[in-house]
Amino acid sequence: MELLRNMSLEKLVEIFELTSNMNDENIPTVRGWLMEEIEKRNPEGFGRWLDDDCPDDSRLRKYVLA
């Protein structure tokens, strides 16, 4: 988790996007860690993304990096 805390928000979003099409059994856990850290960095943007009619992975960037 410390590794994630040291990454930039942009890097966290990049990694999140890369996990979108991965099927490894550990990916849901990793995505959960990423989303927790992204939400800590920009709770308002993360909340708007979740409230979107279609909170697609590719749209997260629009909300948290704007």
Image: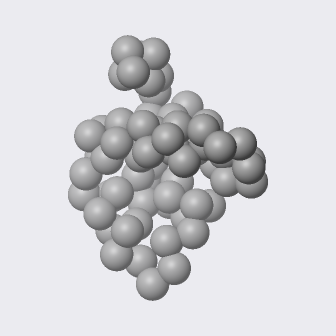
Residue 32: x %, y % from top left: 44, 45
Residue drawn at 49 percent across, 71 percent down: 55
Q: How many marks?
A: 0
In the image, is residue 32 above or below residue 5? Answer: below
Which residue is at the front of the view, 32 or 66? 32
Residue 47 shown left or right of residue 35 in the figure: left
Query: What is the quadrant of residue 24 in the picture?
Result: top right
Residue found farthest to the front: 25
Residue found farthest to the bottom: 53
Q: How is the image coloured?
A: one colour
* Any part of residue 13 in sight: no
Residue 17 shown left or right of residue 12 in the figure: right
Which residue is at the front of the view, 2 or 9? 2
Which residue is at the front of the view, 52 or 66? 52
Residue 59 shown left or right of residue 42 in the figure: right
In the image, is residue 28 above or below residue 3? Answer: below
Residue 57: x %, y % from top left: 58, 61
